[in-house]
Image: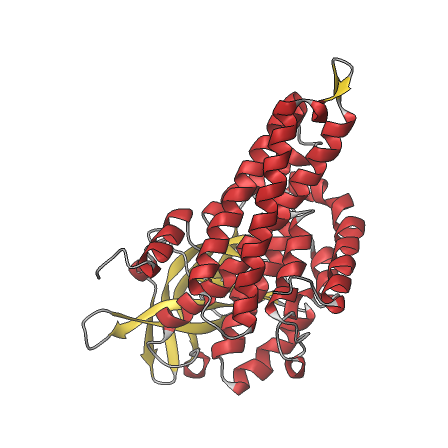
Amino acid sequence: MDYSLTSEQELLRKTVREFAQGEIKPKALELDRKEEFSYELTKKMGQMGFLGAVCDPKYGGQGLDYLSYIIIVEELARVDASQAATVAAHNSLGVGPIYHFGSEEQKKKYLPDLCSGKKLWSFGLTEPEAGSDAGNSKTTATLKDDHWIINGSKIFITNGASKMTGGCTVQAITGKGQDGHKEISCILVEQNTSGFTAKEMHNKLVWRASNTAELYFDNVKTPAGNLLGKKGDGFRQMLATLDSGRLGIAAMGLGGAQGAFEATLKYAKERKAFGKPIASFQANAFKLADCATEIEAARNLLYKACWMKDQKKEFKTLAAQAKLYCSEVMYRVVNHAVQIHGGYGLMEEFPVAKFYRDQKLLEIGEGTSEVQRIVISRALGCYSE
């Protein structure tokens, strides 16, 4: 097996790392403190091609393989989770459903602006009473003449309320199937549609410089042609979208773990106690050794999952494993990182404090760690249903 990256992928990593170090790192702490979404950085990331990474160039995308896209997210997360979240959510949850399930007319209408970074797009799935239980959605869409009438709300929607946001792919109940279960469909809703309100959410523990929104739909009228794919395909579309999106969350865990580890290794070699660098004390050295080992294992698992996706092989279980493992590896790494820093690890001017905060969402977003374990155990045949 050949584990080496291509020369193009190595160059991509170098380019994204230089961008993250030079453009994002000097601003990250201040943006986080102010809870400020950066339009300047987002537009620059669009110009760099980060926001249409895997889309076909005929729609304005870069046409990259999925592993290359994951490297972009990894390198951004190594410096700042908020900017990585903007890119990951836009590609996986925003662009992805339109690119994979949209009509040619929808792709031509929306994708060029989304791939260039002129606009962002969100995915309206989570509701106040429907998180892990996504099938419990209460948002409804009723077809009346040639329009859908949408009512309901969504919460915790990344990229949902920025000035750049062009719209949202909304999961809604559109009727009942023959089996009596809810029929779920996805519908494209443009941002300035009458009755559609997007409200920014603040006072977050994590990803404070990313845009998070509550969405409200009050008799929102949107054309019948804005249905994504076929009526009733929404749940299947959502599950497929999350399978790919989990690789992006895994990349954020991997990148964040790498960034926290590097900062801690540097600190441990420079900080002295009892006349020696604290890295030389076995208690710290073993923590660092464990971190390095787990990061290497996480990278191999994630990259294999991406390779399987790029080869058009079944990757759903590997995606769940990668998301679960990478997010929890980052938890263990940042926990060690703060401990090694001691009191300084509790101060925001040291990067490990922010890494520590930002990690937690990775165990919750796009399927909690518990949900990932359900997906994996089902693949093992542990459930009869």
Residue 117 in view: yes
Left or right: residue 84 versus residue 44 is left
Q: Is residue 4 above or below residue 342?
A: below
Q: Residue at x 66, y 72 (%)?
A: 64
Q: Residue furthest front?
A: 1
Q: Quadrant of residue 15?
A: bottom right
Left or right: residue 42 versus residue 239 is right
| 197 vs 320, nearest the viewer | 320
The picture places residue 162, in percent across and down from the top left corner, at 60, 58
Looking at the rendered image, the quarter that the C terminus falls into is bottom left
The picture places residue 134, in percent across and down from the top left corner, at 34, 59
Q: Residue at x 46, y 66 (%)?
A: 315
Q: Residue at x 42, y 48 (%)?
A: 369
The picture places residue 45, in percent across and down from the top left corner, at 72, 61
Residue 160 in view: no
Indicate the colouring scheme: secondary structure
| Number of callouts | 0
Looking at the rendered image, the quarter that the N terminus falls into is bottom right
Q: Residue at x 51, y 75 (%)?
A: 312
The picture places residue 360, in percent across and down from the top left corner, at 51, 41
| 325 vs 74, nearest the viewer | 325
Q: Is residue 337 above or below residue 21?
A: above
Q: Is residue 85 above or below residue 228?
A: above
Q: Quadrant of residue 195?
A: bottom left
| 12 vs 128, nearest the viewer | 12
Q: Residue furthest top?
A: 274
